[in-house]
Amino acid sequence: MRDKSGIECLQKAIFLYGAPASGKSTLGKALAERLGAGFVDLDERIVAEAGMSIPEIFKTRGEPAFRDIESKVLQEVVSASYEKLSTLNFELSTLTVVSLGGGTLLRDENRSLCEENGTIFCIDTPSDEELARRIGAAPGSRPLGDKAKERAAHYASFPNRVAAFFDAQSSLVVVGRGIAPAILAGRNVVADETVARLWSARLGVSPFAIIPSGEEHKTPVTVAKLWRAFSERGLGRKDTVVALGGGVTGDLTGFAAATWMRGISWINVPTTLLSMVDASTGGKTGCDLPDGKNLAGAFHFPKLVVIDTDFLETLSPKLVADGRAEMIKHEAIGGRSWSSELELESGEGDFSRREGAGVSAKEIAENLMVKVGIVREDPLETLGRRILLNCGHTVAHAIEKATGYCVSHGEAVAIGCVEEAKIAVRRGLASASWPEEFAARFAAAGLPTSLPDGISLDVLVPLMRGDKKREGGVVTFALPCGWGDVRGIKIDLSKESL
Ligand SMILES: NC(=O)c1ccc[n+]([C@@H]2O[C@H](COP(=O)([O-])OP(=O)(O)OC[C@H]3O[C@@H](n4cnc5c(N)ncnc54)[C@H](O)[C@@H]3O)[C@@H](O)[C@H]2O)c1
Ligand SMILES: [Zn+2]
């Protein structure tokens, strides 16, 4: 973006738009806080300007007069941020998050003004039930009448969308499309080399640290490289780093942030499906050691997680399948299969539009809620609830080790889930048809469902006993027993067969 004198400058504003009660002010405040940005609520400014409430303005002066005041106030807000920007020498603190009114951009001049001065994020319209819940109206009522429906085409005309936002422990999670560039502008970005190559130019960011891609680089050596880069960048306690990449980049950057000056804040922008639905939330950061995966680490929740489905466009089918495996695991934990059913019943804006990888922002948000729900109950893994997230993983980790990591994590999770479903059947915990039903779901996502040639459970048992959840010979499995039915079961592998 360019300022008035044509000089390249930072993003000046993020405008939040959408139907009444779509959450513009709530998200605006939370987002501004996480971004260290200013916040303006346009409706509040209008009330201050007019000296009366908005319903009073409508009643005494009519809608056209209200719209005139709104345009004037918007113009003032935008020029104020311009002035601040030039006096502060283009510092990041000049970013402003502005929550607009539900009809502010019906006027073309307002829309142009916002487009020229920042990025508009349009929040998808919540369902009538959700609206009723938010504003305390009777369930089943249509609390805001048909306004949102009348304006559906108008709202749908904004390309950058927020499909959902929610709080996950200390992280604000925002899921949408086309929202990453405005968040990343001017920040301290760490990316892996693949993501930097594919996305830097398109996003208009130049990462200050680029790490090599791949699990083999998830090591203390790369963490030390990040510390070096933080030092050269002069990052201090008040600074924030942004991880732009898959689970490896997030885990490493989060861990470097957790340990830099005893902990600085970080923002996570996951770019693989797996990291969107799994690794990005839950606060676990770390790196691998020669003795095992993820052995060095810390809980350090990112203050903001921005999930942008645009990144799915460049994923290979194999990487999509890896993410799908964790999504299906979440379905087993959270219950079947809202993802496809919601798709049918939705129809709000293009909230459920399927992206390049055949996955919509809505599916991701709903799926993530399974993990978020469990993390909320047991944030630091002290209560045993988080064990459910390991569904299929005890067998999966053993498969990865037995094959020298030739089988990808997602593939191993698919096979591990099906094998663990069979263990559940053998222990009388699930119906005989369950493993086949579960397997069909993985197979439909292009994932394998049977053990690789030459590998049997007998081969895997010694490797499972080396699992980090081991206590003596006892391993805690999270056995899938049906949709919405995953159970933590302790099995003594030194005495019992699977
Ligand atoms: N912290 C947690 O709670 C948690 C949970 C699950 C997994 N993990 C970790 O996550 C890692 C696996 O995540 P992952 O699969 O994202 O790994 P990854 O970060 O290695 O990404 C996989 C590959 O995809 C590439 N890539 C990333 N975004 C891309 C894009 N948009 N287009 C094309 N290529 C892209 C990467 O460069 C890499 O080569 C593991 O290290 C695992 O331990 C962490
Ligand atoms: Zn996993």
Image (cartoon, rainbow, N blue to C red):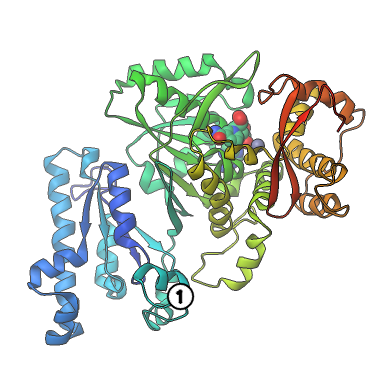
Tag 1, which secondary structure? helix
Quarter of the image where one finds residue 42: bottom left
Give residue 409's quadrant in the image.
top right
Q: Residue at x 47, y 79 (%)?
A: 140
Q: From what the image shows, is residue 378 above or below residue 149?
A: above
Return the residue at label 1.
Answer: 128
Side of 401 where 140 appears, left or right: left
Q: Is residue 244 above or below residue 175?
A: above
Name the kind of residue labelled 1 in the image.
Asp
Query: Which residue shows up at 38% across the image and 39% down it?
Result: 303
Tell me: 175 left or right of 234: right
Q: Position of residue 186 (x, y in %)?
A: 32, 38
Q: List x then y, in percent, for residue 463.
A: 78, 22
In the rendered image, residue 495, in percent from the top left (x then y), is placed at: 84, 24
**Relative depth, front residue between 33 and 389:** 389
Which corner quadrant holds the C terminus? top right
Q: Is 109 above or below relative to 436?
A: below
Residue found at the far right of this picture: 454
Residue located 63% across and 71% down the image: 344
Q: Mark yes or no: residue 404 visible.
A: no
Residue 485 in picture, x, y percent from top left = 70, 51
Tag count in the figure?
1
